[in-house]
């Protein structure tokens, strides 16, 4: 039965990787393989000899272990594990829902238009550096996916020539992924490690800020000498579609960003899970959003027409809550994808498959540079994980690593995984959520990116990895 479960996972994984070829949204195979894997576990529960207890981080097996338990107790263990994994997954999903809603509320008030007003120069090189630093900083606060969407939307308003714009988009992808790696709220994979108590905010920033900064700076510096970034941008005529900015836009931008940054502080002070702080931040932002909303709901209009249901319905529909509007705009397919892939990986973890695979890796791979720990995982494995994240989705790779390795909180292994998985995806345009969304927004060709941008991303990845290997000796 284990072989069947692995086969289902591999087939589902391939379907996710080949999403653009088979024209099936990746959330569909993710949800399917989650359900099928757990169904197969239930059907074959009586035959399994080992079980990985994620709560205790230990393998339940041996002569008098899991294999000797009666079927009803094995079923109970399975239900406990399923509930445990669902709880841990729900923490991530609720956290992401809160962050996405805050970002949509900012956008409801056109808050991100404030960033456009900061860009006064027409020098291509200066604009490149401005967008690179904006991507690096914004992705650390509102995550790399959202930062990419915001900045490319701004690019489209200030640069009319798409052939010029796609070069900027390529560097934004590199900078956004680099910025997301050093922040606990900057990338889904980093958030997973943070919520899973593998990294702390302070140590994550200490280990990864400089490697991530170099991962952005070096490619941007090299690109600034390339021909597409020489000279000045042509002056753009003001479009008639450019609407007047919302008067509360800047306020909501600063309030929303501050609320998201507050979440790690809340976790450190209260020791509560991050999603609790995110819900508090969302509630504060939502209060101000409702107060600042220009739409008003008049109860007097309803009372004056009591008994007239059609008039009352019109009055109710006239009130558009910014919070309700923002909730309707969040990326629910992404949430469902994360649910499917994380719970599918949890199935492999529960059977002890990932634990056994981690042991094989430790025993068979050569050490590269400084060994992380006695008998630990080599740097080569983590570097390969980073390269692999450019080919396949980094979320399941990091989810698998959570089940494979048992190193304690803030072990350097987890920080290197956070960096490699976060920045390695820049090497191919399909290797990260930021790349995929940029590909869709600007219709960037896969092979154009591979020829023009991938080598810059590879240089940044290697420079950042080398910097991490130096910095970890100081901790």
Image (cartoon, rainbow, N blue to C red):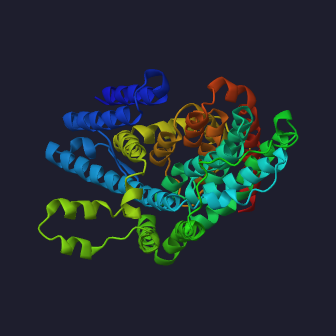
Q: Say if 354 sits above or below 214 in the image.
A: above
Q: Is 58 placed left or right of 408 in the picture?
A: left
Q: Position of residue 116 (x, y in %)?
A: 68, 56
Residue depicted at 61% across the width and 35% down the height:
442
The tally of labels here is 0
Q: Is 321 placed left or right of 204 in the picture?
A: left
Q: Position of residue 165 (x, y in %)?
A: 71, 38
Q: Position of residue 47 (x, y in %)?
A: 23, 34
Camera-side residue: 22 or 106? 106
Q: Is 270 placed left or right of 301 in the picture?
A: right
- Work out whether residue 167 can be spotted: yes
Residue depicted at 63% across the width and 30% down the height:
444
Residue depicted at 43% across the width and 44% down the height:
334
Camera-side residue: 366 or 449? 449
Q: Residue furthest front?
A: 304
Q: Is 120 placed left or right of 193 in the picture?
A: right
Q: Position of residue 387 (x, y in %)?
A: 63, 34
Q: Quadrant of the C terminus?
A: bottom right
Camera-side residue: 329 or 417? 329
Q: Say if 335 sits above or below 202 in the image.
A: above
- Work out whether residue 91 can be spotted: no
Q: Quadrant of the N terminus?
A: top left
């Amino acid at each position: 039965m284990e072989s069947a479960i692995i086969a289902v996972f591999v087939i589902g994984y391939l379907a996710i990787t080949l999403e653009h070829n088979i024209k099936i949204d990746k959330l569909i195979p993710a949800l399917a393989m989650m359900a099928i894997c757990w169904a197969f576990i239930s059907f074959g529960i009586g035959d399994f000899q080992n079980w990985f207890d994620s709560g205790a981080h230990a393998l339940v097996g041996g002569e008098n272990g899991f294999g000797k338990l009666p079927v009803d107790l094995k079923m109970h263990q399975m239900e406990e594990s399923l509930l445990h994994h669902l709880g841990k997954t729900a923490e991530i999903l609720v956290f992401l829902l809160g962050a996405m809603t805050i970002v949509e509320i900012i956008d409801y008030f056109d808050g991100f238009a404030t960033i456009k007003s900061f860009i006064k120069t027409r020098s291509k090189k200066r604009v490149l550096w401005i967008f690179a630093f904006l991507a690096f900083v914004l992705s650390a606060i509102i995550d790399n996916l959202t930062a990419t969407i915001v900045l490319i939307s701004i690019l489209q308003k200030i640069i009319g020539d798409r052939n010029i714009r796609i070069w900027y988009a390529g560097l934004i992808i590199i900078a956004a992924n680099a910025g997301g790696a050093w922040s606990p709220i900057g990338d889904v994979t980093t958030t997973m490690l943070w919520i899973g108590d593998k990294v702390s905010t302070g140590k994550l920033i200490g280990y990864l800020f400089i490697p991530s900064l170099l991962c952005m700076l070096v490619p941007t510096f090299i690109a600034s000498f390339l021909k597409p970034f020489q000279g000045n941008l042509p002056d753009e005529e003001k479009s008639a579609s450019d609407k007047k900015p919302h008067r509360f836009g800047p306020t909501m931008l600063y309030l929303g960003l501050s609320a998201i940054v507050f979440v790690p502080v809340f976790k450190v002070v209260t020791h509560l899970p991050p999603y609790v702080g995110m819900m508090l931040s969302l509630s504060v932002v939502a209060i101000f959003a409702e107060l600042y909303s220009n739409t008003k709901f008049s109860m007097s209009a309803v009372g004056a027409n009591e008994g007239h249901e059609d008039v009352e319905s019109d009055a109710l529909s006239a009130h558009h809550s910014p919070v309700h509007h923002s909730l309707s705009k969040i990326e629910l397919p992404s949430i469902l994808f994360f649910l499917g892939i994380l719970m599918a990986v949890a199935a492999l973890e529960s059977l002890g498959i990932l634990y056994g695979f981690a042991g094989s890796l430790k025993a068979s791979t050569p050490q590269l540079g400084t060994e992380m720990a006695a008998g630990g995982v080599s740097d080569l494995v983590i570097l390969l994980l980073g390269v692999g994240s450019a080919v396949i989705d980094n979320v399941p790779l990091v989810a698998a690593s959570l089940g494979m390795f048992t190193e304690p909180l803030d072990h350097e292994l987890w920080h290197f995984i956070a960096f490699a998985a976060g920045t390695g995806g820049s090497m191919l345009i399909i290797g990260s959520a930021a790349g995929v969304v940029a590909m869709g927004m600007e219709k960037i060709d896969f092979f154009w990116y591979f020829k023009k941008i991938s080598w810059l991303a590879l240089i940044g990845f290697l420079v950042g990895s080398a910097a991490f290997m130096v910095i970890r000796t100081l901790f």
